[in-house]
Amino acid sequence: MASSISLSVPLCSPSNSLSTSLSPSHNILFLQNRFHFSRFPLRAQTLDFSGSFFEGAGFGSEDDPITPGSGFTATEPKEEPQCPPGLRQYETMAVLRPDMSEDERLSLTQKYEELLVAGGAMYVEVFNRGVIPLAYSIRKKNRAGETNTYLDGIYLLFTYFTKPDSISILEETLLADDNVIRSSTFKIRKRKY
């Protein structure tokens, strides 16, 4: 497995070569030093990596503890739906109050999904990112006149295809809702490279 190798570096050799007691089967890279050193012994060890991951056996070999049937499966790339004619792809990020219960969040999510579908949206997907700390505190006054300061929020990401006219209705509803701290909508443009 490990073999000991002794090397000696000559003093001020004009060619800066190394005299070694290595057999030609050892593949060790030596960096030549341009400085002048006195003669000193240098010890190194070589490790035998034959049959390991580094020799090409890699993952999926017979002795690999993680086999394809052990529950680890590669996720296949999800095919994105094609944009229907007359519609554009949008993303809306909404930050909700962090003290909302799970039922309140689900009902709010369903409300905005139905609003999008009623406005002509297709392929509506909602991603709940969970409670995430905000980069800065946000003060928001609700309809009752109370001012609240929020340090974190529940992030929801809506992706959908819709007509450009229906975006203004969604943004007005999000702005008027006391449960939504912040929201923003972006048009997704496909890059052509």
Image: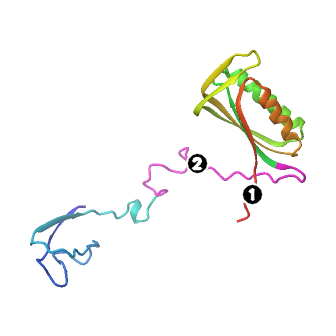
Q: Please tell me whether mark 1 sits on a helix, a strand or a loop.
A: loop
Which quadrant is home to the N terminus?
A: bottom left
Q: Is residue 71 shown in magenta?
A: yes
Residue 155, percent from left and from top: 66, 34
Pick whichever of labels 2 and 1 is earlier in the sequence: 2
Q: What stretch is highlighted in magenta?
A: 59-88
Q: In this view, does 154 lie above or below 84?
A: above
Q: Is residue 66 shown in magenta?
A: yes
* Residue 170 occupies quadrant: top right
The kind of residue tagged 1 is Lys
Q: Please tell me whether mark 2 sits on a helix, a strand or a loop.
A: loop
Q: Main secondary structure of the magenta part?
A: loop
Q: Mark 2 points at which residue?
A: 73
Total residue callouts: 2
Q: Name the residue under label 1.
A: 190
How far apart marks 2 and 1 lie (CA) works out to 29 Å
Query: Is residue 119 in sight in this rendering?
Result: yes
72 and 120: which is toward the camera: 120
Classify mark 2: residues with Cα within 10 Å, few (<14), some (14-19) or many (20+). few
The kind of residue tagged 2 is Thr
Query: Is residue 134 in sight in this rendering?
Result: no
Q: Which residue is drawn at 89% across and 43% down?
A: 165
Which quadrant is home to the C terminus?
A: bottom right
Q: Which residue is drawn at 75% across and 51% down?
A: 188
* Residue 82 occupies quadrant: bottom right
Q: In this view, does 1 lie to the left or right of 107?
A: left
Residue 191, percent from left and from top: 72, 60
